[in-house]
Image (spheres, grey):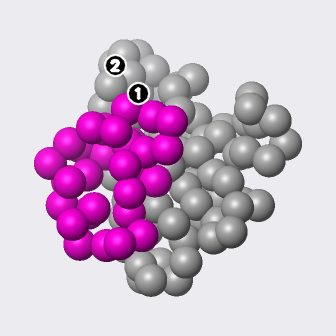
Amino acid sequence: MSEFASQLPGAVEEQPFGPDVDVMKVGGKIFAILAPGAVPEAISLKCEQGLALELRARYDAVIPGYHLNKRLWNTVLLDGSIPDHEVREMVNHSYEQVVAGLPKSARGTLG
């Protein structure tokens, strides 16, 4: 999922928490936190509150955000139980949530 997330407009990958955690940012704000070495691999994503609850109810592999605001973040265990296209939609939703919160001037530079 890191490769997919890094292709979104303006996405930047950093490792502020060390080499084992990949952080994807847009406009200086985090939209995805990946733990590629975890078993199973996991990705934490920002999510609209109602959708966050819906996804947790639908998928056992979607849990409240680990060490994050549990109302607005989900951690998705990439154990193969969620179709890839669904995970990509979750990544897109997280990205869009963060972009929507950026100043208009910053959003204009993402094109």
How many numbered markers are drawn?
Answer: 2
**Looking at the image, which is closer to me, 46 or 12?**
46
Instruction: Identify the amino acid type marked 2.
Output: Lys
**Looking at the image, which is closer to me, 98 or 50?**
50
Q: Are marks 2 and 1 in contact (CB under 8 Å)?
A: yes
* Residue picked out by circle 2: 104
Report the side of 95 relative to 58 (left or right).
right
* Residue picked out by circle 1: 107
Q: Is residue 57 magenta?
A: yes
Report the side of 67 relative to 14 (left or right).
left
- Quick one: which residue is furthest to the left in this view? 50
Residue 28 can be seen in this image: yes
Residue 86 rendering spot, x and y as whole percentages = 37, 73
Work out which quarter of the rendered image holds the N terminus and state it.
bottom right
Residue 42 rendering spot, x and y as whole percentages = 58, 60
Q: Residue at x 20, y 54 (%)?
A: 53
Q: Residue at x 38, y 63 (%)?
A: 62
Residue 96 can be seen in this image: no
Q: Secondary structure at mark 2?
A: helix
Residue segment shown in magenta: 46-75
Residue 65 rendering spot, x and y as whole percentages = 43, 45
Q: Is residue 1 magenta?
A: no
Whether 58 is drawn above or below 6: the answer is below
